[in-house]
């Protein structure tokens, strides 16, 4: 089948066109058409496919099959004129197209900025729905150096440099200072950012760098010995900044400090919270001792089972461990804390029983998860669980386990 003429090579801003259907097929159960020419960009080179309509029918995917572009549709188009003769009108989603142009051109600028400042080559690029990623062949980077990369990239944007595309025969491609060797043979399409970057690329791009808008790196992570950067351009950068401004404004109001002092305020509160937790633990341990003595004195059997209203997991654990040191063979406590129902089971050191298997028996009763050691297990599950039923079942299970190991 002959190659489809790609109208976006001539004009990436072209959104409307007319073409003839030259073939039909089915792709993953959906109808698809092949046109003699198209403005729709297929999935390729890390850039997603265009969306839009053909004769009013939504285009759900666009594929490149060895030069032939296949348009997958939501439903079958009409066949009145017959294959090879039917003319259709295509309309590309302009908002999605321009967004992809901005992100892809922004990637070219960012990739060359990494080359200039760190000699960091681009290993891969992915244009996502909300943000894009760029994998660079470096192992680490300081905040200061990352700022330099961003400043350089945005300087190129603000200079509003021309972005040109043209084809170069493979025999002459060595004359072009490409950022990386091309992956195609024959005619090579070059995307040139005036005086800054030359790349072999078949994607859609802006006409001038000023159309890209702000370029902002929002995350970095190590992967495969490289660094992968998440970035946004243009409208995406604005949306990201708006979200973060709202978050900062809320935190600044909560802590009653300027935006720049939020990290220090959070750190201070964290230190204070850590100190409070330490003091609370001391108080809970002391209280557990008193409460454990009261429970031990009032115990009528070897197993003490109680529902502890609103007691923290740490408090329930401390009470259970204190109690089994005072005579009872085991403690079974249930509480609600942190949005979950919780079970705490403990047994005395002198009691030959392993509580660990009971976690697998009790956890499914309230969609719980947990575990522990032979003498102590903890399980957390659904907040609305019936604590009375849980305590009853857990007490029975503990009694059976103790009886199995201590027949007398």
Image (cartoon, grey):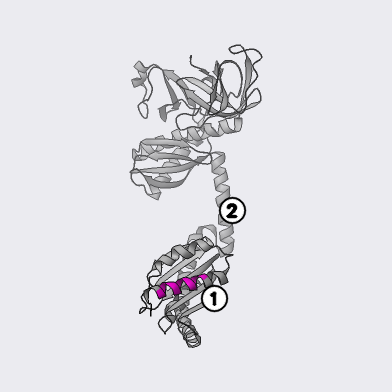
Q: Residue furthest front?
A: 407
* Secondary element at tag 2: helix
Mark 1 or 2: in front is 1
Choose top left, top right, bottom left or bottom right for residue 385. bottom right
Q: Main secondary structure of the magenta part?
A: helix
Residue 401: in magenta span: yes
Residue at 42% x, 77% y is 321
| Mark seen at residue 231 | none
Give the vertical position of 120 relative to 188 (above or below): below
Give the vertical position of 295 relative to 357 (above or below): below
Local packing at callout 1 (Cα closer than 10 Å; few below 14, some 14-19, many 20+) is some
- Which is more toward the observer, 334 or 159? 334
| Mark seen at residue 246 | 2
Residue at 50% x, 26% y is 63
Choose top left, top right, bottom left or bottom right for residue 248. bottom right
Q: Which span is picked out in magenta?
A: 393-403
* Residue 131 visible (yes or no): yes
Q: Earlier in the sequence, mark 1 or mark 2?
A: 2
Where residue 105 appears, as percent x and y from the top left, is 48, 32
Choose top left, top right, bottom left or bottom right for residue 151. top left
Q: Which residue is mark 1?
A: 308
Q: Residue furthest bottom?
A: 297
């Amino acid at each position: 089948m002959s190659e489809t003429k790609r109208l976006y090579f001539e004009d990436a801003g072209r959104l409307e066109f007319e073409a003839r259907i030259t073939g039909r097929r089915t792709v993953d159960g959906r109808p698809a058409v092949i046109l003699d020419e198209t403005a729709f960009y297929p999935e390729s080179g890390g850039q997603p496919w265009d969306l839009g309509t053909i004769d009013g029918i939504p285009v759900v995917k666009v594929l490149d099959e060895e030069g032939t572009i296949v348009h997958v549709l939501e439903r079958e188009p009409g066949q009145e004129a017959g294959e090879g003769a039917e003319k259709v009108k295509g309309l590309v989603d302009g908002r999605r197209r321009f967004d992809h142009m901005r992100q892809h051109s922004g990637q070219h600028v960012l990739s060359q900025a990494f080359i200039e400042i760190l000699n960091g080559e681009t290993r891969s690029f992915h244009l996502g729905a909300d943000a894009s990623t760029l994998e660079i062949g470096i192992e680490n980077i300081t905040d200061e150096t990352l700022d330099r990369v961003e400043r350089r990239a945005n300087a190129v944007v603000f200079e509003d440099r021309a972005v040109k595309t043209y084809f170069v025969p493979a025999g002459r491609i060595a004359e072009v200072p490409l950022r990386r060797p091309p992956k195609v043979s024959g005619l090579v399409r070059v995307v040139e950012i005036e005086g800054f970057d030359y790349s072999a690329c078949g994607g859609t791009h802006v006409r001038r760098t000023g159309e890209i808008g702000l370029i902002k790196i929002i995350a970095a992570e190590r992967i495969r010995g490289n660094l992968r950067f998440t970035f946004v351009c243009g409208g995406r950068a604005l949306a990201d900044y708006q979200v973060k401004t709202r978050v900062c404004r809320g935190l600044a109001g909560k802590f009653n400090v300027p935006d720049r002092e939020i990290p220090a305020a959070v750190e201070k509160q964290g230190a204070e919270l850590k100190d409070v937790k330490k003091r609370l633990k001391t108080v809970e341990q002391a209280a557990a001792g008193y409460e454990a003595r009261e429970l031990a004195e009032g115990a009528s059997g070897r197993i003490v089972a109680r529902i502890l209203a609103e007691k923290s997991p740490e408090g329930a654990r401390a009470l259970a461990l204190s109690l089994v040191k005072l005579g009872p063979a085991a403690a079974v406590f249930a509480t609600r804390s942190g949005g979950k129902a919780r079970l705490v089971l403990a047994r005395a050191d002198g009691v030959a029983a392993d509580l660990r298997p009971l976690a697998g028996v009790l956890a499914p009763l309230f969609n719980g998860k947990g575990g522990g050691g032979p003498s102590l297990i903890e399980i957390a599950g659904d907040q609305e669980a019936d604590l009375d039923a849980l305590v009853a079942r857990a007490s029975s299970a503990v009694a059976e386990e103790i009886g199995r190991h201590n027949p007398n």
